[in-house]
Amino acid sequence: MNDLKRHGKAIKVYEGENKVLSSLEEAIDKAGVKDGMTISFHHHFREGDYTLNMVMAAIAKKGIKDICIASSSLGKIHEPLIEHIQNGVVTEIHTSGLRGKLAEFISKGGLEKPITIRSHGGRARAVEAGEIKIDVAFLAVPSTDAMGNASGIGANTQCGSLGYAIVDAHYADTVVLLTDDLKSYPNMPASIRQQEVDYIVKLEKIGDPEGISADATRFTKNPKELKIAENAAKVIRALPYFKDQFSFQTGSGGASLAVTRFLKDFMKKDGIKASFILGGISQPIAEILEEGLTDHLFDTQTFDAYAIESFRKNPNHHEISVSEYANPWSMGSVASQLDYVILSALEIDRDFNVNVMTGSDGIIMGASGGHSDTAESAKVTVIVAPLYRGRIATVVDKVTSVITPGKDVDVLVTERGIAVNPARKDILAILEKTNLPVVSIDALADAALKIVGKPDPIEFTDRVVANIEYRDGSMIDVIYQSKA
Amino acid sequence: MNDLKRHGKAIKVYEGENKVLSSLEEAIDKAGVKDGMTISFHHHFREGDYTLNMVMAAIAKKGIKDICIASSSLGKIHEPLIEHIQNGVVTEIHTSGLRGKLAEFISKGGLEKPITIRSHGGRARAVEAGEIKIDVAFLAVPSTDAMGNASGIGANTQCGSLGYAIVDAHYADTVVLLTDDLKSYPNMPASIRQQEVDYIVKLEKIGDPEGISADATRFTKNPKELKIAENAAKVIRALPYFKDQFSFQTGSGGASLAVTRFLKDFMKKDGIKASFILGGISQPIAEILEEGLTDHLFDTQTFDAYAIESFRKNPNHHEISVSEYANPWSMGSVASQLDYVILSALEIDRDFNVNVMTGSDGIIMGASGGHSDTAESAKVTVIVAPLYRGRIATVVDKVTSVITPGKDVDVLVTERGIAVNPARKDILAILEKTNLPVVSIDALADAALKIVGKPDPIEFTDRVVANIEYRDGSMIDVIYQSKA
């Protein structure tokens, strides 16, 4: 760590020029996008993002090749990248998540160079440390004035927090804002400030607000998930960190979000208020602030219209950059102050390693997100997951891909029992004194095996299609090309 | 300018340690302050600052030598630096201003190495560009939590905006906060965020709130100053930039602040609202926001208790860092959007050069501040100054020291007439059609000369005691050792 310095973006001097350009094409020219460059995007609009595809189409049309895309994440909507990869326009990808046809294409070896998968905090770390050097950031913003004071609140396409975009604006050599709501000066309060911004392009529409609230944040009605959620909340309540001024984050995913509902009931019953809730903020969390059961929300990404309205109107709903959220190479992220985090899993194994990235067929279908960031940081990390889904086990011998290592995971709550990481003897001792169904993780893995049977091993080639970085930049796993 | 990059501060990793230390001595040890280092301070508490002297006393006691002090400014209260200079503890000073005995001591050659005087925007530029590399920033903050989320609002010593401190927190390798109000986590909203902060020391008292409101922001009752102020407001009203959604800044100094009063009357009469007012924010400016005559205030330094209360409660009273305020090496400071700035002068000469630094005896007695920053940036720069003060001319043949070059100055308003820089033919043409007393600057200089007589030339040695940087880093003048 010694002698590492934060990356410094290019210094440029404003001389009174008009930053508002007439088209993406002009912005690409003025920003000097050329072969081999790294360009960045954020995913605040999730499946409703129009801008990445528009920018990449314009870049492809200009005949520019060999672009490295460093997006905070990628979704199903970014399927057109397949064509850009096939045409040599895109030759490298850094992302937190990958879904849909693009994920399948890459899993099956469609991109020559392995992609790099990072956690949200890990990406902030890599950008700040200059491991990802962003030449040009194309940042969709719900509103901006003509100088570049930009906000996640706008007339057409709102997203609330601009937590991912803030980091890119600070470190990219050139920053291009894309908006569909150009406001009069000054557009305050602003999340991105004018001195960071080179160009602005007004587009007809930057995204589909409907696409922001995706499945990952739906509220579950599944009885199995509700039971898991209730038991997870009971685990939290049983541990000594559950006291006035405690803090927590609930990850996305049905059961994980549902924990919030039960936790809220316990907080009311016990007369306990949180000091802060961290997240990805969705309606159930914003309601807790509204009801006065937490003093603060820290919001790096806003998940739905209700939470966006909370962000807009509630002065204790605070926007934070993803670096403030979880950058491990800083003097303390907000995550470092967490008491509890409740997270979901696609798979968890006998060593408590968690996979949220690859499906049981070995195909990429998820996102690293803030999983390992918060799991490592929080005092107690609770994974909520069903023992199996359909005919596929969740608790397994060995996860297909490690995103969060077992050392960061303390408790697994399933519908068949609660397993505690043997490293957390303190937690085990407490839970064993309750009437909660504490079992060993091996018992859960054995039970899952008994119910769904031993799966056929996934067939991979020996070619690596993705490198998975742990939040500190070390390589924690690789994903091989799927034969599926 | 090509290939210049922003300076990157040292990357450090928080590992759960307690940041709150028991004493300044411990902070100096842990921060690793040693011979030859550059340490920084801010001047938000102006003449009420206790912290610089306390830190320097502790450093001196440890036998550390050869320290470079990079303070955003220095005041009369920092007189104890004289002893530290004499003892070799301090051997270099970067500052915007210098007053009192310390200024006299340096003017008379007390410090071997010339000090460097910068404007506020020029200092932000130098810090961001790595020309000033801050090893350790000691930043007094009215409140912080134990992680370092710090604010200009606190229980004991409030200062409002932390505009200068924000820049140092971003770029100093090590950041030590000094507070007399340690809050529970999280202390939000915060101007300095936890991930920038290494250590925190709780002191009994960090400053004297009375010292924040200094003479420089008093409201004048002097009839001559009031006449000048009224005419300056008339000049502003006569020019075409005075229209709805215009913007302005009024500098400190009696006449300059008084312009605000007259301007407000004209705004009401003409039904005109400002889009923003920039500053140094004092009560008369905060009242304009309160009365709904401006949409926004941008505040890099808050001058009095009324303005601090406005900062605390009014969501359109925005804190900005001094880099956002006026850094010329950025993609556009807020100053770059100014229509008018009204500034005072100790001297202004026939070429419209302005001196706000040295007295008629050649002794340093002022501050560069935001003078050249706003003068260069605004569409119209109006200097308000009496023809003479006592027996000393203000309008002179040649200023003792140039802080703001004549190219940045458009209009001079005195009690004996209004002079327009010949470079601004557009302004001259408009003002000549009014009944305002437009004269040439030579006529004003001649009149001053006639009244107070030709002063004896100031006697200087040929040794330089201060280098004056223009905001872009070029050397605009030097101050020689005074024989006074």
Image: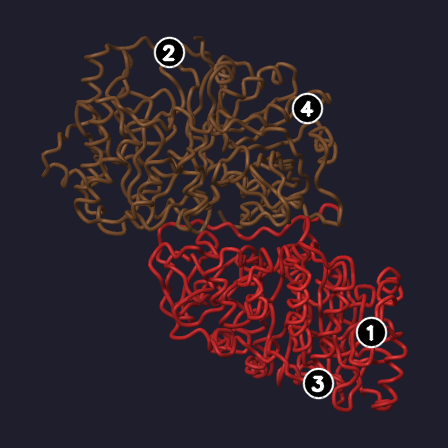
Chain colours: A brown, B red
Q: Provide the residue designation for mark 4.
A: A58
Measuring from the top left, give residue A119's x and y in whole percent: 44, 34
Amino acid at the residue labelled 1:
Ile
Amino acid at the residue labelled 2:
Ile
Tell me which chain the residue with mark 2 is part of: A
Residue B336 or residue A128, whichever sits in front: B336
Residue drawn 55% across the image and 81% down it: B77
> Which badge, 3 or 1, comes first in the chain's sequence?
3
Residue B305 or residue A41, whichever sits in front: B305
Measuring from the top left, give residue A413's x and y in whole percent: 22, 29
- Residue B418's disc is 1
> Which badge, 2 or 4, comes first in the chain's sequence?
4
In the picture, measured across the screen, residue B365 lies left or right of residue B423, that is: left
Residue drawn 48% across the image and 57% down it: B192
Is mark 3 in CB contact (under 8 Å) with mark 2? no
* Badge nearest the viewer, 1 or 2: 1
Q: How far apart are the two marked residues, 1 and 2, measured between alpha carbons?
A: 86 Å
* Count of picture labels: 4
Q: How far apart are the two marked residues, 4 and 3, measured between alpha carbons?
A: 64 Å
Q: Provide the residue designation for mark 3.
A: B108
Q: How far apart are the two marked residues, 4 and 1, measured between alpha carbons?
A: 55 Å
Measuring from the top left, give residue B291's x and y in whole percent: 55, 63
Amino acid at the residue labelled 3:
Lys
Q: Provide the residue designation for mark 2.
A: A458
In the picture, measured across the screen, residue A156 lies left or right of residue B435, that is: left
- Tell me the element at label 1: strand
- Residue A157's disc is none
Q: Are dots 4 and 1 on a single chain? A: no
